[in-house]
Amino acid sequence: MRIVEILEASGHRNIVAENKATFEITKETHLSKKGDCIVGIRASKGACELSEEFKRLAKRENARITVIFQVGKNREVAIGRGSSQLTFKHPTDLVARRSTYTCGRTLMIKTDKAAADLSRHIIEKLKNENQKMKIILIVDI
């Protein structure tokens, strides 16, 4: 079974994407350089707004979660796992983690990429505040 969610987010001049443990997409409209895991702001959804079907499947231990970032003609893919510990309670944030830590912001655990691993070409494009990014979330079981 497969469920797909499509989100949009925007770039920001302070995107640095240097975090080695996580990446984050947020609905927030401001970003300081301290937010080194954030790769997109003004997201169209936070964790609590994902569909019930997506959340239900992602909470299965055997779930595979794929995040596809589409920036113009450039594409980046990150793959992680679901967990029964995911709650999807946060109103503004979605965080992918290399670790198995979960909280209300966590989208997936055991991701194969953190912010620092993402294409520098895409990150450079996302430093433009007018740059739009399409984000495709896929959960498979």
Image (cartoon, grey):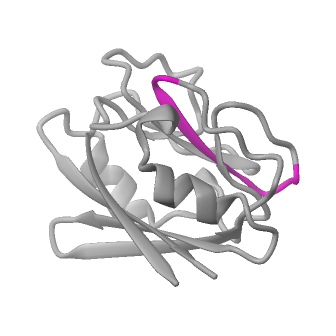
- Please say whether residue 22 is one of the residues in the magenta stretch: no
In-front residue for pair 121/136: 136
Q: Is residue 45 above or below residue 118?
A: above
Residue closer to the observer: 10 or 56? 56
Residue 51, x across and y down, in percent: 42, 50
The residue positioned 59% from the left and 20% from the top of the image is 34
Residue 73, image x, y percentages? 17, 75
Q: Is residue 119 left or right of residue 60?
A: left
Along the horizontal axis of the image, is 29 left or right of 128? right
Residue occupying the point 28% across, 29% down: 42
Q: Quadrant of residue 131?
A: top left
Residue 1 lies, in percent from the top left, at 52, 84
Q: Is 139 situated left or right of 109 in this image?
A: left
Q: Is residue 4 above or below residue 9?
A: below
User: Which span is picked out in magenta?
Assistant: 91-100
The C terminus, quarter of image: bottom right
